[in-house]
Amino acid sequence: MELYLSFLEPHRIRYVTNDHTIVHDDHIEVKYEFTTTVGSHRFQSELRGQDLVDHFDFDVIWSDKDSRTDSFGSVRGVGSIQRMKMWRDKYTTYHYLTFYANRTDRRYREYLVYLYEADIKNRDDSHRRLRLTVRGRRGSAPDSASQSNASGSHSSRRFSMASLRQRPRTSSQHHDRHHGSSHSSVPRSNLLPPTSAISYSLANGLDIRYLSIQFSRPDDYYRFIEQWTIAQNADGEFGGVPFPSDCFELPSPEILPGDGRDIYTSTSVLELPIMEEPSEGYDPRNRS
């Protein structure tokens, strides 16, 4: 599945020959077919600006707002038969989960791992199910149907992650060709528009109490638990404190060939006077 990537919107593709002649420069529908999974993961990481830690296939994801089945007993949830991916931000080193919510608003959901409790207390190994509980949001949640009738739709408060990451993002969505699996690619070069297709979910804007996942295979289930523990331990070292906003890193000076040699052969170093060691019993106060 990871060998095939396609995009939901046309991209500008430019082909240049060895003599720098442009033979094609236009917006076209893009589909990539990779020869190795490593190459595909590296491409996705560079495109998104985050390291792809791992991916997991799931049967259904649901929450207290969107139940696992509908009134007829059919599987629904937030998304089903998709691929969830875990990312590590190169700037803040925080971890994120992304998947395509094809059963609700058809948006690309992204969740900060640290917003959920580290311990997975609700898990069913026989059915490959587990529940991720939001920090500080325990207890029963309001009925989603009553809230839907009151508001006319499933509304959700969303909070931009730009303030946390210090790097605004805009969504560039692409998905895998098999199983309809998809995920979002979020370059850092542009600002995040209000109509972004990615649902950013932070603690004070997250209107769910838990997120339940039923994985497709036992391997994905146990691998997720392992990666979840590693991510929580890594993110917990910062205690949820975002990267300092007033921190500015100066670029490293450009080092040209030969600069290292010139440092040690500089005349300003070689011409320093050689100081002799003082004799035994020398007192600097009795200088004549």
Image (cartoon, rainbow, N blue to C red):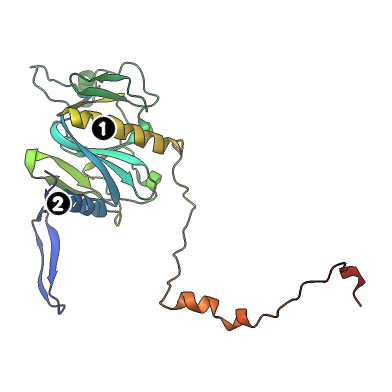
Secondary structure of the residue carrying numbered label 1: helix
Mark 1 or mark 2, earlier in chain: 2
Q: CA distance from mark 1 to mark 2?
A: 22 Å
Query: How far across and how far down the image is residue 272, in percent?
Result: 67, 80
The quarter of the picture where residue 81 lies is top left
Query: How far across and how far down the image is residue 194, in percent?
Result: 27, 45
Secondary structure of the residue carrying numbered label 2: loop
Q: Amino acid at mark 2?
A: Thr
Left-right relation of 20 to 248: left
Q: Is residue 86 above or below residue 191?
A: above
In this rendering, the label closer to the viewer, 1 or 2:
2
- Mark 2 — residue? 36
- Viewer-nearest residue: 124 or 196: 124
Identify which residue is drawn at 26% across, 32% down.
224
Identify which residue is drawn at 25% across, 32% down.
223
- Viewer-nearest residue: 145 or 185: 185
Query: How far across and how far down the image is residue 285, in percent?
Result: 90, 69
Left-right relation of 17 to 223: left
- Viewer-nearest residue: 242 or 226: 226
In which quadrant will I find the C terminus?
bottom right
The answer to whether residue 65 of the structure is visible from this angle is no
Q: Is residue 29 above or below residue 265?
A: above
Q: Amino acid at mark 1?
A: Phe
The answer to whether residue 22 of the structure is visible from this angle is yes
Dot 2, how many residues are within 10 Å of its Cα: few (below 14), some (14-19), or many (20+)?
Answer: few
Residue farthest to the front, as pictured? 280
- Mark 1 — residue? 224
Q: Is residue 25 above or below residue 68?
A: below
Identify which residue is drawn at 38% across, 50% down.
91
Dot 1, how many residues are within 10 Å of its Cα: few (below 14), some (14-19), or many (20+)?
Answer: many
Left-right relation of 52 to 262: left
- Label for residue 19? none
